[in-house]
Amino acid sequence: MGEDMTRIDASTRPSTASTAVLPYVASAAAGRTRALRAYMLAMPVDLGAFLLPLVWDRHYWKGLIAAGVVTVVAFAMGGLYAGRRHVSFLDELPSLCVRLLAAAAVVAIIAAARHDSVPYVVGFLHQVAVSAALVLAGRALTRTAVVVARRHRWVEHSAIIVGGGPVAVELARLLRRYPQYGLHFAGFVDVPSADHADDDGQPLLGRVDELAEMIRLVHAEVVIVADVTCPDEQLLRAVRQPGAAACDLWVVPRLREFHSQHGLPDHIGAIPVTRLRRPALMGPQWMIKRAFDVTFAAVGLVLFSPVMALCALAILVEGGPGVLFRQQRVGRYGEPFRLLKFRSLRPRDADEAQTTWSIAGEARIGPVGRLLRRTSLDELPQLWNILRGDMTVVGPRPERPYFVDRFSADYPDYAMRHRVPVGLTGLAQVSGLRGDTPISDRARFDNYYIENWSLWLDVKVIVRTVSEVLHGGGR
C-alpha cells in the first residue's frame, strides 16, 4: 500500500483501548442488539393492532383474523418489514393504506359470498376500518420508537464502508453525525491505490480482498459499497466470502439520479442506498427446505423400495456382487462424504473411479447399466445421502475431490458453489448442463441458483427434473 494510507490488520491493529481507534471499532450497543436483527418489531405490533377490536367485539372474529393475516402478508410482500436506514412513517403511509384497502377488499368479497348479507358485510368493514386505524397508529409508534432508540444509540450496528471517494467520505461523515440511521462507522475498506488521508477521520482498515477479515476484527454487521474503484469481479469475490455473508449489504447506486420504481426508496442523508438481497441460506425457509428433504427422502425410500430391489437384482444378475457403488464426493463447505449409486460399471481400479470424467460412451457398460443411467434410476440410493444430511434434493451436483481441485484452480467461481449442500438434481442439470458441458457454465448456473434461491425455485427445478426423467433425459 501507499505510505499515505492508514491500515489496520491482524498483526498491527491497535487494541480497542487505543484512543485513535476507539471511535471506529464495534459500537458498545452492537453486541447487545445483534440478536434483534432476527426479529421484527413491526410485524407483531401490526397484527396485534389489527386484532385489537376482538377484545370488545368478537362477532366478526373469523373475518378479522383472516384480514389480519392477509394484511401482514401484503405488508411483507411490499417490503414494509425490510430493514431501512431512513425510518419514516410518512414515507410508508401510502403503501400501508393501499395494502390495508386491498386486504379488506379481498376478505370482504369472501365474506359477502359466504353470508349474502349486506348488514353483515357493512358491520365487518366497519370493524376492519377500526383495525386499520389502529395499525396506522401502531406503525407510527413503532417507527418513533426505532428512531428514539437509534438516536440514543441503544440500537445500532457497526458498518464498514467499501470505497474511499467523495461519496464514501460523505457517508462516513453522515453516519458519525446522525445516529438515527442506526449505523456506527467502523472504517473504510478500499483498494491499495486509493488516496486516504493519514488521520483519524478516514481510518483505512484494509484492502477489498481482506473484507471478510476486517468484518471479523471490527465485528461489523453492515457493509456499504460506495465509490470503490475496483473491478466488479474482485468486489463480488469479496462480498461472497463466508465472513461477509452474515452482513447486510447496501450499495450506493452508480446512477444515483435515476431512482428505482420498485419498493420504498431509502437514503442516508441525501445519498440514495439500496439493500441487496442475500441468498437465504439460513433461517425459516432453509429449515423448511431441510424438512422437505427429510420427508422426500423417507417417502421416496419407502415408495421406491420395490423398484430399488428390482434394480439391485438386475445388477446382481448382470455383473455379480457389488450392487452399490460408493464414491467420495465433496459437499457443503468442502466436506467429503460417500455418495451412493447403483453400479452401472465396475471400475478397473480406484484411480479410474476418481479421475475419469465420463463413462457415457464406455463399451463395458451392459444393458442394465445403460437403462439405469438413461432413466436416472442409478441415482435412487442417494435418497439415503439426503436422509443423512450429506445432500439435499435440489442443489449443485456433487463432484469428486480430484475434479473439484482442478476446476477450482481453473475457474475462480467454482468453489463458491459449495456454500450450500450438494443436490440430487440442480438448476444446471435441468438447463442442459450435464455430461460433457463447459464447467464455467455449470458454475455460473450453480451460483445463480444459490444467490437467487427460494422454495419456489426448488419446486421449478423438481418439476423440470421429473419432466426430463419421463422423457428419457438421463445420461
Image: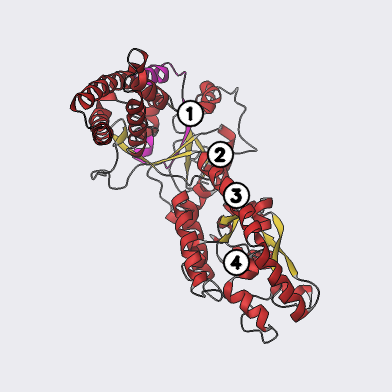
> Is any part of residue 10 visible from this angle?
yes
Q: Position of residue 408 (x, y in %)?
A: 60, 63
Sequence-wise first label, 4 or 2: 2
State yes or no: residue 161 in magenta.
Answer: yes
Kindly identify the amino acid type of the residue bearing the numbered disc 4: Phe
Kindly identify the amino acid type of the residue bearing the numbered disc 2: Met
In the rendered image, which quarter contains the C terminus? bottom right
Specify the color scheme: secondary structure
Mark 1, residue position: 39
Instruction: Residue at 47% x, 18% y: name it.
Output: 154
Looking at the rendered structure, the secondary structure element under dot 2 is helix
Mark 4, residue position: 407
Gap in Å between the C-alphas at discs 4 and 2? 28 Å
Is 448 situated above or below 474? above
Nearer mark to the viewer, of 1 and 3: 3
Nearer mark to the viewer, of 2 and 1: 1
Sequence-wise first label, 2 or 3: 2
Gap in Å between the C-alphas at discs 2 and 3? 41 Å
Sequence-wise first label, 2 or 1: 1
Gap in Å between the C-alphas at discs 4 and 1? 40 Å
Q: Position of residue 267 (x, y in %)?
A: 31, 34
